[in-house]
Image: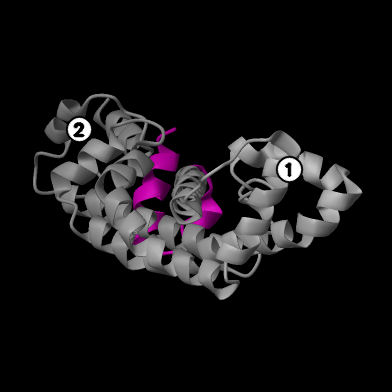
Amino acid sequence: MKKSIIALCLLFTMSSCQELLDVLESSRGVTGITKSEAASGLKQALERGVISGTSQLGQNGGFLKNAAYKILMPEEVQKAVSQIRGNPLTNALAGHYIDRVVTSMNTGAENAMAEAKPIFVNAIKSMTITDAINVATGGEGAATSYLKKTTTPQLKTRFQPVIKKSLDKININEPWSKVSTAYNTVTGKKVQTDLNEYVTDRAVVALFSQIKQEEDKIRKDPLARVTPLLKKVFGYADTQK
């Protein structure tokens, strides 16, 4: 019974933290896995997951060429963008500026990913054994939720200047003014959008979506366990399925 409980815990699927604490109360668990090792295994899995996730999004085209995460123009102007594209006159006026804005937004998000790694690593290393156990017993996505709760404000603070730098490189005021003018021409309205905040929010949402995928992968895929500790902790869990 105890072996089954610890195995489920190590796979992040157990719901009772107290049962886990009871099982691991002794200095060494029933199979030579200590509470410290279990927590360290989880931290190692998280660290590998966030490094892999941020690296994928941070590479050239990680956003721009990724259909799942590509940052498009703000939703409130999407219809107008379609109308601009469909009208030869307005497309000639603003089409290439829209392309420049979209490219700049996605490049900024890609560049910002480098800022995420040290924030995530620090949050993971700062986890206590109790934190790690709570994450382990919290069910699917619990690790991602923990990171979201503890790092989101820092991520936004660090992302914004990087994204702003990317937007500034294309002198965003001019193209955005052109896009807004075309928008006004088509709709008779005026839109004011803080592109830096918009791109930052989209980048953070995409990042945690990718981290969730990496969390699931390490939990389920033996090939993702590339260190001795991960193989020990998760390998034992596999033998108890």
Give the spatial CA distance, label 1 vs label 2: 63 Å
The x, y position of residue 82, in whole percent, is 78, 41
Q: Quadrant location of residue 140? A: top left
Neighbours of disc 2 within 10 Å: few (<14), some (14-19), many (20+): many
In the rendered view, does 241 fall on the left or right side of 145?
A: right
Mark 1 lies on a secondary structure that is helix
Q: Which residue is at 26% across, 56% downward? A: 124
- The amino acid sitting under disc 1 is Thr
According to the image, label 1 marks what residue?
Answer: 185
Residue 38 in the image: state x and y as whole percent.
25, 49
In front: mark 1 or mark 2?
A: 1
Q: Find out whether residue 236 is within the magenta segment.
A: yes
Instruction: State which tag comes first along the sequence, 1 or 2.
Output: 2
Write down the region rendered in magenta.
Answer: 220-241
Q: Residue at x 16, y 48 (%)?
A: 129
Q: Nearer the viewer, residue 66 or 24?
A: 66
SS for tag 2? helix
